[in-house]
Image (cartoon, helix red, strand yellow):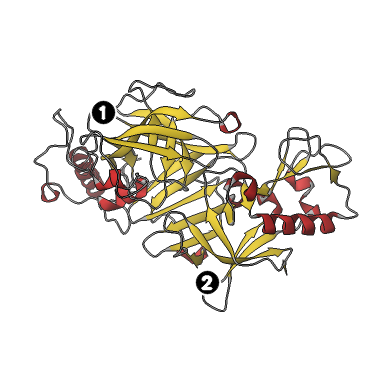
């Protein structure tokens, strides 16, 4: 495409500044080896290309709820930057890679193990403190931050916290090398049921080590993340302002839970009718493929479903072990479109402090799957069976075909209908 003189000059200036600023943004190097981040660099020595109020990062997603079972992104990390596939998890904070430190126990990875930098985060650094089980933790090595993270699916990782470079493309066309903390996971324990090849986890929770918290602390984006999971597979995640607020329904983030993206109280609604089940707290978590209700809400949902399916051509399919509850028809089903007419929408109605309640609708497509056997299965499970107690977890399946926004600055959770197969394009200089 041809450019006029003004556009050409601006593009040349932007390209010049990109190469310079990409070596400046980030924390100063703390180890003794040479860094791409000059120790003498200061904020005044580099033109400010990004306005945090308007800048954002959009990253395409890959995967699906079923049969893949997860969504992931490709991030380029290290010096030189190398690609890694990371599972997206809004339910945890730390971003980490399986790491050749050497590795004691690592599962299969799509790419060669990450070779760590020697830029270690000290034990008493605030980022390290945020990963410890209590404020009174012991530093066996003052120059090194050791951590252990346990996940609800019995997966755990041991590692050491360090700094390295992330290569990020911003939507205004600027490409930056941003130095941030990440985990070098050298000892993983996983259960066979949750196993799949992965390079690591992209932690997008509310804590200090979360990628969005680190980007925000460096003044690069607002403390906002979001995602759009397509039911057809793929989608995108974003950091900063990359959504249309006019189409979003909002509810406050719970003040009781400081760790998760949770909201409540909410009431369970089935087919537009109140179920009598209320005072529900819901956690929105991309780390789970399926949704989980507490025992009371789950049993109520099964009861309403059973009544509603009476007289319809669906029968229990106990031989299908894909999920706990499945039904078969007269012939195998090929898509949700064939069965959605038999099911009603479910909803969580949040009391947002006003007269109008914020309703998070879960359409049949957002709580059902078609198994490889051609049966329709319920993608909402009993959370008490995995130790969630009274929590209700909204997983990937129920957030499909919605743009989800987690406004950490305003302490709001929002959602709205969206075509998640259309990834927003970057503007400005092509990179």
Q: In this figure, what is the number of numbered marks?
A: 2
What residue sits 51% from the left and 55% below the top?
A: 404
User: Circle 2 is placed at which residue position?
Assistant: 352
Q: Residues within 10 Å of mark 1 (few under 14, many from 20)?
A: some
Q: Is mark 2 on a helix, strand or loop?
A: loop
Q: How far apart are marks 2 and 1 (CA)?
A: 46 Å
What residue sits 61% from the left and 40% below the top?
A: 65
Q: Which of 91 and 166 is in front in this view?
A: 91
Q: Which quadrant of the figure has residue 64? A: top right
What residue sits 74% from the left and 35% below the top?
A: 321
Confirm whether residue 63 shows in the render: no
**Quadrant for the N terminus in the image:** top left
User: Circle 1 is placed at which residue position?
Assistant: 117
N-terminal label among 2 and 1? 1
Q: How crowded is mark 2: few (under 14 residues within 10 Å), some or many (20 or more)?
A: some
- Furthest toward the left, the residue is 40
């Amino acid at each position: 495409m041809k450019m006029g003189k003004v556009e050409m000059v601006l593009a040349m200036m932007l390209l010049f500044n990109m190469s310079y600023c990409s070596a400046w943004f980030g924390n100063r190097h703390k180890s003794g080896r040479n860094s791409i981040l000059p120790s003498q660099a200061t904020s005044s020595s580099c033109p400010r290309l990004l306005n945090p109020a308007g800048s954002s990062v959009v990253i395409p997603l890959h995967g699906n709820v079923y049969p893949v079972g997860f969504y992931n992104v490709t991030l380029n990390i290290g010096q030189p930057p190398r690609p890694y596939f990371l599972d997206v998890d809004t339910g945890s904070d730390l971003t980490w890679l399986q790491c050749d430190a050497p590795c004691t126990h690592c599962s299969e990875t799509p790419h060669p193990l990450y070779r760590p930098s020697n830029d270690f985060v000290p034990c008493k650094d605030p980022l390290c403190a945020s990963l410890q089980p209590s404020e009174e933790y012991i530093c066996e090595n003052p120059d090194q931050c050791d951590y252990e993270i346990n996940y609800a699916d019995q997966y755990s990782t041991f590692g050491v916290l360090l700094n390295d470079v992330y290569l990020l493309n911003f939507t205004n066309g600027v490409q930056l090398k941003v130095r941030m903390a990440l985990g070098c996971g050298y000892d993983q324990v996983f259960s066979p049921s949750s196993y799949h090849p992965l390079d690591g986890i992209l932690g997008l929770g509310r804590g200090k080590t979360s990628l969005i918290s680190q980007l925000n602390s460096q003044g690069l984006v607002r403390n906002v993340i979001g995602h759009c999971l397509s039911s057809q597979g793929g989608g995108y995640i974003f950091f900063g302002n990359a959504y249309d607020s006019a189409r979003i329904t909002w509810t406050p983030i719970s003040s009781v839970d400081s760790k998760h993206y949770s909201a409540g109280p909410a009431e369970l609604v089935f087919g537009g009718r109140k179920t009598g089940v209320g005072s529900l707290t819901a956690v929105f978590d991309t780390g789970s493929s399926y949704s989980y209700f507490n025992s009371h809400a789950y049993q109520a949902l099964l009861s309403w479903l059973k009544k509603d399916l009476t007289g319809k051509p669906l029968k229990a399919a106990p031989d299908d072990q894909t999920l706990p509850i499945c039904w078969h028809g007269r012939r195998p089903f090929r898509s949700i479109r064939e069965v959605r007419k038999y099911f009603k929408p479910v909803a969580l109605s949040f009391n947002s402090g006003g007269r109008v309640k914020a309703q998070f609708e879960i359409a049949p497509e957002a709580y059902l799957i078609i198994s490889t056997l051609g049966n329709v299965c319920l993608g909402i499970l009993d959370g008490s069976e995995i130790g969630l107690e009274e929590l209700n977890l909204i997983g990937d399946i129920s957030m499909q075909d919605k743009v989800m926004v987690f406004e950490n600055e305003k302490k709001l959770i929002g959602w709205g209908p969206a075509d998640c197969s259309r990834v927003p394009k970057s503007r400005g200089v092509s990179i």
